[in-house]
């Protein structure tokens, strides 16, 4: 049982959050059961809805994976938000101005976005590794700086005056990511992110660097004691995490839009923290966590369209999940009792 | 016979992990005395004082103050009954002034504000009364250690302490500051305060204390008037073995020296010589033990040998002829050095990670365990499985997080890791502290096996059983110096060892043949 | 360019700096207090938003702006109490707890607004009240100073008083001393009988209180209604302002003014085709540089001490 303690606690947290949501629905809705039904099954109602879930999960997987790496190495960095945004812009620039043939164009755009993400991410990493500057605050500042810089480029250099909204010029057709499944907008980014997740899993558990990352995150002074250069590990983790967040932003822009149109941070970075939390910092679990989050969001969207309860209910569910999953003391008594029993058994 | 101001009767303290720190301890104080509490590390002094100051609750036993039964659940309870404690690590807020630290939690008020002038006045008044000169308006962070200690004493006095517990107060002081402290303690005594003085330093104890309670292995080994007991007798009562272990040691012909330390001297941040002209060598196949009361430079010596010592030092430390003066841990390990650290939790293991991850931490870089960037997962698991079997680690398998094991089993994993890399030199620091007897015996056997395989071993331990039984050569460390060397440790009596450990005796010139000089 | 300086040196501009600074300043003071007690409350954005909505709803139902203000305060304190319970009692990670508060507020306010008014975007259908502007006699007649300092919303004046109040609280009162001691050396505080949890709870509640005042200003002064996500990142700016201010009350005040000024400037800059977006990033960049300089100095100091 103990082996699954974290998993059980996660499930219980999710269950409590859903129960709270149901209770709220019961008070608010004219037809509580019908509304709950829509919320739970809405995403399954059509291929297009299922497609929506998967599309929404793609950026969540990218930022979730990025945050998993950072959290796992013990870095409280919330910078995926800004990196996601600015890299999307970089990819957009190449999508607008580059001229390449079909396959190369998006590849070049995504690569450019990813590299920019990695390089920008390294800055707080270096500051932390070398001078122990607080990554949380620096990464938050970077989010605001990148948002401002991105908006500047959008407004002054990329804005299409002919369009009515505050959006960029149209991307070249060649830059757009291919759609995978007809009838949905699921794009080639899905394959890319799944590959990234597999690679990260392999990296984390089967390579020297991944090993160093886990040891540094679990106990930095133990890592030092074992001869690991933890400063270098921290910078490397930031580079990779930035790469993933950047790739996510680029893929999202090229897969879902035909123009760059984010006038503010899109919020996927903080969502990434929630995904990482649900996935217990485990790369493979990111898939399930992102799909779950996307599922309840699409369910809530359906609910708001088809019933009298607004979709924002979902943010209450998310908040409860975060509060409970990361609560050390939550269900601790139960764990301690189990631990004691286990210890007795082993002698 | 004076009546007792305070009595602790039959105090028993058993920690949740089963360690009995106090077993039926009796302790009493007379009004207006300076009372020493002496004992080795782990003898139960700290636990007893924590109970007296309300930081721990006893499992059983009673505390009587002025003929009245009292119970202390928090330090606040003890403070309100007139008990104050000066901790070894000062409880001061660095950016505050002396006066602010003094009144923290009991601030004098003028309207809504803190009455700063009143705080300064209170500080001044108290510091004049007890001749503990401090500047009330100075920032604490700018004060010397001695000054900070005065502030701590004043803080306790301001809270109405009549009984003052000082936890190894001289450990952090220069000799001049110590002398000053003693004058102040005598002043306090004249004013009718009662002082509990915890110390290992027998000369100091002898100099200012009226009575002494000696503790050993969780019990009271005796209470004496200072006039009735010699330092030698105190030492004999303090230092001793409870269980005599016996191990069969193979005949080993020592090889060439693997570790050589010459003239190693290190001055710490306080300006004291934490290491003073240390010279020793450890040969292949030899176990060299370093005994001593903790805090006499052992930790600094280990740090100097494992790349953890920051700052300047003089002298040399060489492993197989290579100077390791400026090397970091990785380079030192590269020379074939293994290290079992004292602190399992913070240095020895990554708690949340699996046993096999913890086992390969020092060798995953070697080509046997990786193919370029990739780790050889199967071999690693095989290694972990075989070590788990060899060291009889009780666990569910190599994938179990090490943090879920008991202390003894965790230590077995750490020792297994450090022993299984075929090191030339093994540095073992308190390798059996806090583990059960079974695990301790296994660790001892493994160390002897390593010795038979020609590994040079430096063993630092406060456990006399272990160090007397295992060592081929034994040094005693006192006040940053190696004060004695023994060729046949198993024949050394505890009594004799105690004299060196407590600084009562020192060999003139190291080398077993020289005559000892009684100080 | 002359035009630009004309705008910057106008009394209108100075007036708008104070106006724009108000919500940032409130929240920054809140962030300051919790940081001083050793806990980083990054839920400022969500707390402000909650306060903004509560102010609107309560004032609409009671018909009184002042009771609305009380409602805002109560909501800010309540949401911080939830955060305090989770982080201090059942040990939710404080940063994640803050994220949860923000997530809850950004959707939860819309949810509640919809339930009450049937509208998801704005609270136009609620007859909410606005806190009055205050014209200060005598002062308003003084040239230059009058138009700058007089005629502000009552909360703007309160925010300036709050600077003095927080300064006084932290520097001069027993509670302030205890808050700082808990943040700097919790063991020392504990050893003299101060309950660390209690002081940290008080600090969190105070930070919620100030953030909710900032929120109330947004919906009952700056604007006269609640709109979805109306705080628009001001809670994060407040955290930046606290960091830039180096953890002192005066520093936080000055840093808030700097952020306020760059915000206020953006309108002027827009007219002149100077990229306000870029100018807006300067204070954040300054914060990063400030943190870096501090971190390098700390590293040097530590090395020197050991060396």
Image (tube, rainbow, N blue to C red):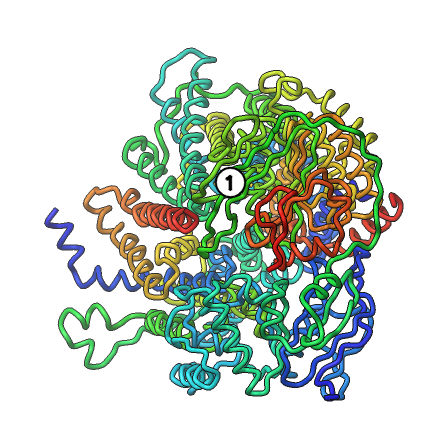
Whether B377 is drawn above or below B150: the answer is above
Tell me the quarter of the picture where residue A154 sits: top left
Going by the image, does B447 lie left or right of B133? Answer: right
The residue wearing badge 1 is A269
Q: What is the residue that sits farthest to the top in this orientation?
A: A101
Which residue occupies 73% across, 44% down?
Answer: B489
Which residue occupies 83% across, 69% down?
Answer: B24
Disc 1, SS: helix
Residue B222 is situated, as x and y percent measured from the top left of the image, at 77, 70
Mark 1 nearby-residue class (10 Å; few <14, some 14–19, many ≥20): many
Residue A253 is situated, as x and y percent measured from the top left of the image, at 46, 29
Tell me the quarter of the picture where residue C17 sits: bottom left
Residue B410 is situated, as x and y percent measured from the top left of the image, at 75, 41
Foreground: B161 or A322?
Answer: B161
Going by the image, does B445 lie left or right of C184? Answer: right
Residue C140 in view in this figure: yes
Foreground: C261 or B500?
Answer: B500
Tell me the quarter of the picture where residue A159 sits: top left
Going by the image, does C155 lie left or right of B480? Answer: left
Foreground: C254 or C15?
Answer: C254
Residue C15 is situated, as x and y percent measured from the top left of the image, at 24, 64
For the C terminus of chain B, the quadrant is bottom right
Foreground: A22 or A91?
Answer: A91
Residue A302 in view in this figure: no
Q: What is the residue that sits farthest to the left in this orientation?
A: C2
Which residue occupies 33% across, 69% down?
Answer: C156
Q: Chain of mark 1?
A: A
For the N terminus of chain B, the quadrant is bottom right
Whether B469 is drawn above or below C16: the answer is above
């Amino acid at each position: 049982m103990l082996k699954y303690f974290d998993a059980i606690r996660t499930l219980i947290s999710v269950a409590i959050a859903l129960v709270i949501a149901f209770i709220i629905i019961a008070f608010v809705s004219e037809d509580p059961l019908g509304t709950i039904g829509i919320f739970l099954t809405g995403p399954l109602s059509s291929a297009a809805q299922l497609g929506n879930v998967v599309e929404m999960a793609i950026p969540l997987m990218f930022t979730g994976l990025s945050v998993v790496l950072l959290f796992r190495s013990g870095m409280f960095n919330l910078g995926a938000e800004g990196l996601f945004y600015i890299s999307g812009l970089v990819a957009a620039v190449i999508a607008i101005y580059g001229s390449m043939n079909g396959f190369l164009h998006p590849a070049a755009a995504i690569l450019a976005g990813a590299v920019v993400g990695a390089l920008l991410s390294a800055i707080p990493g270096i500051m932390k590794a070398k001078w122990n500057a607080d990554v949380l605050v620096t990464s938050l500042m970077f989010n605001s700086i990148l948002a401002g810089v991105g908006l500047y480029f959008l407004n002054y250099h990329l804005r299409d005056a002919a369009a009515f909204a505050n959006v960029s010029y149209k991307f070249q057709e060649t830059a757009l990511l291919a759609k995978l499944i007809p009838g949905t907008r699921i794009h080639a980014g899905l394959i890319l992110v799944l590959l990234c997740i597999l690679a990260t899993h392999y990296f984390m558990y089967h390579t020297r660097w991944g090993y160093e990352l886990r040891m540094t995150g679990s106990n930095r002074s133990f890592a030092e004691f074992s001869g690991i250069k933890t400063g270098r590990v921290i910078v490397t983790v930031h580079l990779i995490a930035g790469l993933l967040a950047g790739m996510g932003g680029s893929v999202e822009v090229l897969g879902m839009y035909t123009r760059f149109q984010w006038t503010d941070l899109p919020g996927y970075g903080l969502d990434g923290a929630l995904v990482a939390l649900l996935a217990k910092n485990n790369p493979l679990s990111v898939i399930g966590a992102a799909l779950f989050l996307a599922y309840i969001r699409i369910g809530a969207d359906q609910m708001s369209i088809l019933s009298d309860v607004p979709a924002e209910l979902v943010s209450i569910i998310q908040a409860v999940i975060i509060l409970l999953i990361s609560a050390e003391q939550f269900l601790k008594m139960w764990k301690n009792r189990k631990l004691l029993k286990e210890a007795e058994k082993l002698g | 016979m004076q009546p007792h101001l305070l009595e602790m009767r039959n105090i028993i303290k058993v920690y949740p992990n089963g360690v009995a720190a106090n077993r039926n301890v009796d302790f009493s104080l007379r009004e207006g005395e300076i009372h020493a509490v002496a004992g080795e590390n782990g003898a139960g002094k700290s636990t007893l004082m924590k109970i007296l100051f309300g930081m721990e609750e006893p499992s059983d036993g009673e505390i009587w103050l002025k003929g009245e039964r009292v119970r202390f659940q928090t330090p606040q309870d003890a403070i309100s009954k007139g008990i104050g404690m000066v901790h070894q690590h000062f409880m001061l807020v660095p950016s505050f002034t002396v006066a602010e630290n003094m009144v923290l939690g009991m601030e004098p008020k003028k309207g809504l504000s803190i009455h700063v002038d009143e705080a300064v006045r209170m500080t001044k008044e108290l510091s004049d009364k007890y001749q503990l000169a401090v500047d009330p308006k100075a920032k604490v962070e700018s004060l010397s250690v001695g000054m900070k200690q005065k502030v701590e004493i004043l803080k306790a006095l301001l809270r109405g302490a009549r009984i003052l517990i000082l936890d190894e107060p001289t450990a952090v002081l220069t000799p001049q500051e110590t002398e000053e402290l003693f004058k102040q303690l005598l002043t306090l005594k004249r004013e009718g305060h009662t002082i509990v003085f915890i110390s290992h330093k027998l000369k100091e104890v002898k100099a200012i204390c009226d009575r002494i309670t000696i503790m050993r292995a969780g019990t009271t080994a005796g209470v004496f008037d200072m006039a009735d007991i010699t330092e030698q007798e105190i030492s004999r009562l303090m230092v001793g073995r409870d269980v005599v272990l016996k191990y069969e040691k193979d005949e080993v012909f020592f090889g060439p020296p693997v570790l050589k330390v010459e003239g190693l001297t290190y001055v710490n941040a306080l300006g004291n010589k934490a290491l003073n002209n240390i010279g020793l060598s450890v040969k292949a196949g030899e176990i060299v033990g370093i005994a001593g009361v903790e805090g006499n430079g052992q930790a600094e010596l280990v740090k100097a040998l494992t790349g953890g010592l920051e700052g300047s030092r003089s002298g040399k430390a060489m492993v197989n002829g290579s100077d390791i003066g400026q090397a970091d841990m990785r380079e030192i390990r590269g020379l074939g050095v293994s290290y079992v650290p004292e602190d399992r939790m913070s240095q020895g293991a990554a708690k949340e990670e699996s046993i096999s991850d913890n086992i390969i931490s020092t060798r995953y870089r070697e080509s046997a365990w990786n193919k370029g960037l990739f780790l050889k997962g199967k071999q690693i698991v095989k290694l972990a499985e075989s070590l788990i079997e060899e060291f009889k680690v009780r666990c569910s398998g190599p994938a179990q997080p090490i943090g879920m094991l008991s202390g003894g089993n965790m230590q077995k994993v750490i020792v297994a890791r450090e022993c299984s890399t075929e090191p030339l030199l093994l540095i073992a620091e308190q390798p059996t502290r806090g583990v059960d007897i079974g695990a301790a015996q296994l660790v001892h056997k493994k160390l002897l096996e390593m010795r038979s395989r020609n590994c040079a071993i430096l063993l630092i331990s406060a456990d006399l059983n272990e160090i007397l039984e295992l060592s081929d050569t034994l040094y005693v460390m006192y006040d940053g110096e190696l004060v004695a060397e023994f060729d046949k440790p198993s024949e050394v009596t505890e009594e004799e060892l105690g004299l060196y450990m407590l600084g009562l005796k020192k060999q003139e010139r190291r080398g077993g043949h020289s005559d000892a000089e009684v100080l | 360019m002359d035009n630009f300086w004309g705008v910057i040196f106008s009394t209108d501009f100075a007036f708008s700096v104070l106006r724009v600074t108000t919500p940032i300043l409130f929240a920054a003071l809140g962030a300051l207090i919790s940081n001083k007690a050793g806990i980083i409350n990054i839920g400022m954005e969500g707390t402000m938003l909650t306060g903004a909505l509560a102010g609107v709803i309560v004032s609409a139902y009671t018909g009184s702006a002042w009771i609305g203000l009380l409602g805002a305060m109560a909501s800010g304190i309540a949401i911080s109490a939830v955060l305090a319970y989770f982080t201090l009692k059942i040990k939710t990670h404080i940063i994640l707890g803050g994220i949860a508060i923000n997530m809850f507020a950004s959707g939860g306010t819309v949810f509640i607004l919809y339930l009450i008014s049937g509208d998801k975007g704005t609270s136009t259908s609620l007859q909410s009240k606005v806190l009055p502007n205050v014209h200060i006699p005598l002062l308003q007649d003084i040239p230059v100073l009058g138009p700058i300092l007089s005629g502000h919303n009552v909360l703007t004046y309160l925010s300036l008083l709050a600077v003095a109040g927080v300064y006084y609280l932290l520097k001069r009162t027993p509670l302030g001393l205890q808050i700082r001691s808990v943040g700097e050396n919790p063991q020392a505080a504990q050893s003299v009988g101060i309950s660390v949890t209690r002081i940290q709870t008080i600090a969190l509640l105070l930070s919620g209180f100030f953030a909710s005042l900032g929120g109330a200003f947004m919906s009952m002064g700056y604007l006269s209604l609640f709109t979805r996500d109306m705080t628009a990142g001001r809670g994060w700016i407040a955290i930046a302002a606290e960091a830039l201010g180096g953890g002192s009350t005066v520093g936080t005040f000055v840093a808030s003014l700097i952020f306020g000024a760059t915000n206020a400037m953006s309108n002027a800059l827009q007219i002149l085709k100077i990229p306000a977006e870029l100018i807006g990033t300067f204070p954040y960049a300054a914060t990063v540089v400030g943190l870096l300089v501090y971190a390098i100095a700390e590293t040097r100091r530590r090395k020197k001490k050991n060396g």
